[in-house]
Image (tube, rainbow, N blue to C red):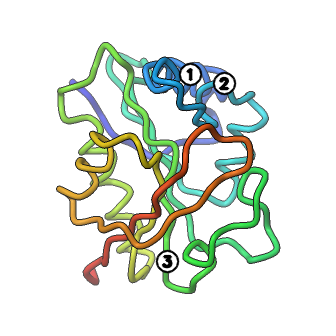
Amino acid sequence: MVTIRPLSSNDCMQTLTTLLHLSYASLAAQGWNFTAVDQSVDMTRERLAGAQGFVAERDGRFVGTVAVRGPKPASEAYIADPPPPLYTTAGTAILSQLAVHPDCRGQGIGERLMDAAEAWACEQGFARLALDTAEPAVALRRRYERRGYATVGGVQWQGKTYGSVLMCKPLLAA
C-alpha cells in the first residue's frame, strides 16, 4: 500500500535526491536536462526551502514526491534565473519536483501526489496553482491539462535544452 504524507525534517535528503534522479532519467534520455536529473542534495534542500514537500511511501521506501510553495519574491532566484511574473503573483502557489519511481508508474501515485499538493494549496488559501514543464514533453503537458491546467505563457530557463511552458489552474476555496 502507498501512503502519501508530508515530508518531514527526519527524511533523508540523499534518498529523496536519488528518487528524483531515477524518476527524471527517462526525460534526460530524451535530451531534456530537467534540474532534477542530476541536482545535488544541497540543491534538493534549496528547492524545498519554503515549500511543503510530500512523499509517497511503500514499505518504508520513497516511491514519489512533489513540492508546493507560495509565490517567490521577485528578487529571489528560481534555481539560476529570476522567477517569471506568474511565480511572484500574490495568490499563486508553485508546484515542482513531481516524481514517481519508474517501477511504480501507472499506479496513480502521481495523481495522488498532485491531489495532496492541490489540497495543501487550497487549505493555505491560494487562488491558483502554477507549474512549468518542458514544451516538447507533450505527455506531461496533457496530464496537467486533464487536471485542469492551462498553458498561460512560456519561459526559457538558463542552460536548459528546451523551452518551458507555464501552466496554471484555478483552485476552489476549501
- Local packing at callout 2 (Cα closer than 10 Å; few below 14, some 14-19, many 20+) is some
| Residue that mark 3 sits on | 92
Tag 3's secondary structure? Answer: strand
Quadrant holding the N terminus: top left
Query: Mark 1: few, some, or many residues within 10 Å (few <14, many ≥20)?
Result: many
The image quadrant that residue 124 belongs to is: bottom left
Pointer 3 or 2: first along the chain:
2
Residue 95's place in the image compared with 153, above or below, is above
Tell me the residue at 62%/78% (across/down): 85
The first of marks 1 and 3 along the sequence is 1
State the residue at coordinates (82%, 74%).
75
In 3D space, how far apart are the residues under numbered discs 1 and 3 (Cα atoms)?
27 Å
The residue lying at 34 percent from left, 63 percent from top is 118
Q: Which residue is mark 1?
A: 21
**What is the number of the mark on residue 166?**
none
| Labels 2 and 1 touching (C-beta < 8 A) | yes
The image position of residue 141, as x and y in percent, is: 31, 50
Q: If you read the primary sequence from the N terminus, does the residue marked by circle 2 or circle 1 appear first?
A: 1
